[in-house]
Image (cartoon, helix red, strand yellow):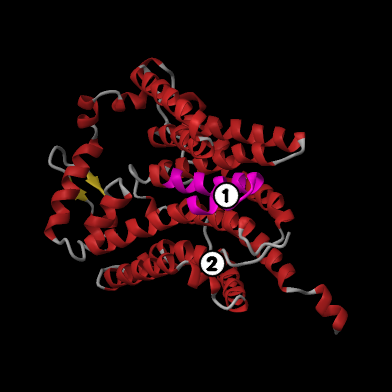
Amino acid sequence: MKSLKKKISIEKITYLLGVLFLYFFSRRGGDTRYYFQGSLMVIGLYYMYKNRWEDIKNNKFLYGITGIYTLLLGLVFLLSDNRSENLKIYLGMTLFSGIFFLVGKNIEVEKKYYKYIISLFMIFSLGSVYRGVEDIIKHKKILSYYRIAGGTFTTVYAMEIGIYILLGIFGIILFKKIYFKFLSGIYVVINIILLICTKSRNTMVAIPLTLLIIYFIWNRKRGSIILLLGLILGIGIIKNSGKIPHLQRLQTLSSVENIKKNARYEIYITGLKMGKEKPLLGQGFYKYEHEGYETRKNGTKYQHFHNMFMETYVTEGILVLISYILFIGGLLYKSLNCLKKLDVENKKIMLLGLSVLIFGILYGQFESIIYFTKPYIMLFILLTICFIITDEKIKK
């Protein structure tokens, strides 16, 4: 019995559950991943209890605002229609994202395993990458205008690919062995090709901007220069995007006049007007998923407001919006504050989590990512992993 106890430990159970969770999470459809994610949250609670709830004492604001956001959003959810259909969306926005992060980051994992975790994440993402490659091959004759979707929706897939690009770039930075760096480089190149074929203006702007911001955080002096030069280069590319194959859609961002002609401009104006009608609790959770709404200029039906804050304001009200902004702001503050306490290697790991968070926020300015169940939860998974690895309680 004693020898069995030595072989079966909480650490080994955590590793096994973690691998199975990442595997099932990488597969589309099915609820198995939620069982493993829930099991990891139970282990997180065990470590919180073991450490006498110190994390709650040290992060009262973050726990408090997450709880307030969850409860307010839950109230709007309960008062809305189609609750059974939208339950997974609600849980994805609360239990399996923010709450998972707060509980999961208390799990204790030996630091030496972080490279295996990143490698596994990349390996398990190959299914999604393959579906994108398959989409390219299937539609190779019409790629000049066709936007690949990798078996899902283009906007959702573009965000997912953006996260993979960041993961691959940090793989190049973090891996010590040259062949791992080489494989990470190939991984990045393939995902960049997929990104170009999605023709996603949002990701094409958000990824470079995220990297510029991250470099600025890493090195303020050099980063200021690089950020300025990057912005100038980016504006130049956008201004001339009409002449660049696969980047023509960026032309809609090339001037104020073109931006006003874009459908999103009218969507935001409509959202502000609709939000004023029911400012306290909003129009209803995921209100327009099925019925849609129309803007003033055309009869097109839209299911959401193409901005995570605007969507929150219109459908869930000003109280939920304020709590959500404070929740996101708290995550940013916590991530930036942790950087000050870390050595160089651990800072690089934390910057991976921070880069994914910043990318999600930037992407969310033009898409309602709160409904993108897989990439939205993926954002919090990577952030959680980075906090687990760099936490002060980690075994040296």
**Label 1 amino acid?**
Met
Q: Which mark is residue 350?
A: 1
Q: In the rendered view of the protein, which quadrant contains the N terminus?
A: bottom right
**Could you say which quadrant of the image residue 252 lies in?**
top left
Q: Residue at x 68, y 67 (%)?
A: 14
Residue most toward the top? 243
Q: Residue at x 66, y 36 (%)?
A: 172
**Could you say which quadrant of the image residue 206 lies in?**
top left
| x then y, percent, for residue 218 | 54, 38
Tell me if residue 283 comes above or below residue 6 in the rendering: above
Tell me if residue 105 comes above or below residue 336 in the rendering: below
| x then y, percent, for residue 316 | 25, 62
| Cα–Cα span, label 2 and label 1 | 25 Å
Q: Please state the total of marks drawn on the protein image.
A: 2
- Segment tinted magenta in the rendering: 336-360
Q: Nearer the viewer, residue 186 or 383?
A: 383
Earlier sequence position, callout 2 versus callout 1: 2
Residue that label 2 marks = 34
CB of mark 2 within 8 Å of CB of mark 1? no
